Structures are given as C-alpha cells and as structure tokens.
Image (cartoon, grey):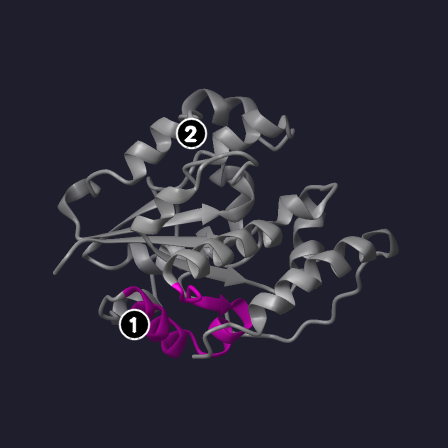
Amino acid sequence: MDETYIAMWSGPRNLSTAMMRSFENRTDTVVLDEPFYAHFLKETNLDHPGREEIILKQDNNWDRIVKRITGPIPGSKKIWYQKHMAQHNSRGCDISWIKKFQNCILIRDPKYVIQSYHKQYPFPNKKLLGYSQQIDIVRLIENEQGLTPPIFDVEDILKNPKQALKKICISVGIKFSEKMLKWPKGKRNSDGIWAKYWYKNVESSSEFEPFQKKHVTIEKDLIPLYDKCLIDYSSMYEKRTIP
C-alpha cells in the first residue's frame, strides 16, 4: 500500500474531531490535530481559551509546520490523516503544499455552526468560520487539477455514517474499515492541548451521533453573518459528494 496523506478541511463545530476519532481507530493510520492552531492564534491575536499555552507548546512557525506535515509519516503508518481548520489559513500564507495531499472538504449548514460556536466563543466575521477559506481551497485544487475535491456535508454523514465513510475512503484512495464506525470513549494523546476546552462531547462519544433535525433560530445581529456564510456554503453544497 502506498503512503496516503489526507487533509480534511473543516470549520468549527463541523464534526471534525469525531471524524478524526474515526480515522484514528484504523490500524494503518496516524492522525494530527490542527497543526496550524498556534500560528493562527499568534497571527490574529484572538483570545481563545488556553491561547498562551497553545502558542507556547505548539510550533507556530508556518514554514516549519509545513515541512513537518509534508514529511515522513510518523509511526511507520501508511496513512496520515490531518485535521485542518480552514480558517487557520492566514492571508498571505502559502498553501501550495496541499497539492501533495488527498484533500477533502467538510461542510455544515452555517446556521448550526453559528448557533453552536457562538455559545462558547463570540466571533466578529465569517473569516473565523472557515467558509471563505474552504472556497479558496476548492478553487486552488480545481485550477491546479481540473477536479473538484470531495466535499462532504455533516448532515449526509450523520444520516448514513457507514456509506459516507465508504465514499470518503474511495475519494482518497484507501480501503474502508469497519473500525471507523466506533471508537473507545475518552481522551487521546493525539488531541491538541486545547481539547480540555473544546472536546468534552467527543470524549464521551463512541460513534457518530444519530442525525436529528434541529430547529435553530439565528440571533438578529448574526443574520448578516449567516447570509454571507450561506453563499459560500451553498456553492460547495451543490458540488458535494452524496453518499
């Protein structure tokens, strides 16, 4: 089996950590959790929980990070699954390194993202939700490779996890494993040091939660933000891979 580098590009509150758990449960895969988070915090000066500790303990030099994540796969594994937050791609930073990767885009209706994320952390603009950066990634790959990268919607995944995971595996050129459907509860050494602030729900999970249609009301002052994000989301949704 050839080595496979997977970059899963998500925004916040997008099932991204559960997806990382799913891949980590494979015997042939090692995972990496948000390698550019410290760089993002340092560049933006955002006051996220644990900011100083994250910047202190995680490498925040863009070029060094790129060299590491495009280097040899750790642990003699064949697959390196990297969980990336699209919003961590700061303006002016070179993302041409992604051409080496099997890139997937993980999207979710912005009304759910805004409602969930805003409970924990207020945000001033759509750049912090990752939709516009996901669009940039899609366009880069389309221009370079002539193909749209696989785009998966959270709702589709939750409605049929097994079928969705099979499609994801096909799209990145690996075999599906039943081990991806369930995982042990608890913390992981692979989790970022920010896990104590953000990962409470996933630490108590052992599989993808059943899909439930939820009624969400967007606060009036957040409607302009929602409308902007919806344009990018809808553009990607039309191109999504349907399980």
Is 43 displayed left or right of 111 in the figure? left
The answer to which of 86 and 47 lies nearer the viewer is 86
Residue 194 in the image: above or below residue 199: above
Specify the quadrant of the image occupied by residue 127: top right
**Which residue type carries mark 2?**
Trp
**Which residue type carries mark 1?**
Ile
Residue 22 has which mark? Answer: none
User: Where is residue 243 drawn, in percent x and y?
Assistant: 43, 79
Tag 2 residue: 62
**What span is colored magenta in the figure?**
146-172
How far apart are labels 1 and 2 at the CA level? 30 Å
Residue 90 in magenta?
no
User: Where is residue 213 drawn, in percent x and y?
Assistant: 64, 76
SS at mark 1 in the image: helix
For the question of whether residue 167 can be seen, the reply is: yes
For the question of whether residue 81 can be seen, the reply is: no
Q: Which circle's residue, 1 or 2, is located before the other in the chain?
A: 2
Is 72 displayed left or right of 68 in the figure? left
Residue located 54% across and 62% down the image: 107
Is 44 displayed left or right of 170 in the figure? right
User: Where is residue 43 drawn, in percent x and y?
Assistant: 57, 27
Residue located 81% across and 55% down the image: 224
The answer to which of 99 and 117 lies nearer the viewer is 99
The answer to which of 204 and 202 lies nearer the viewer is 202
Tag 1 residue: 170
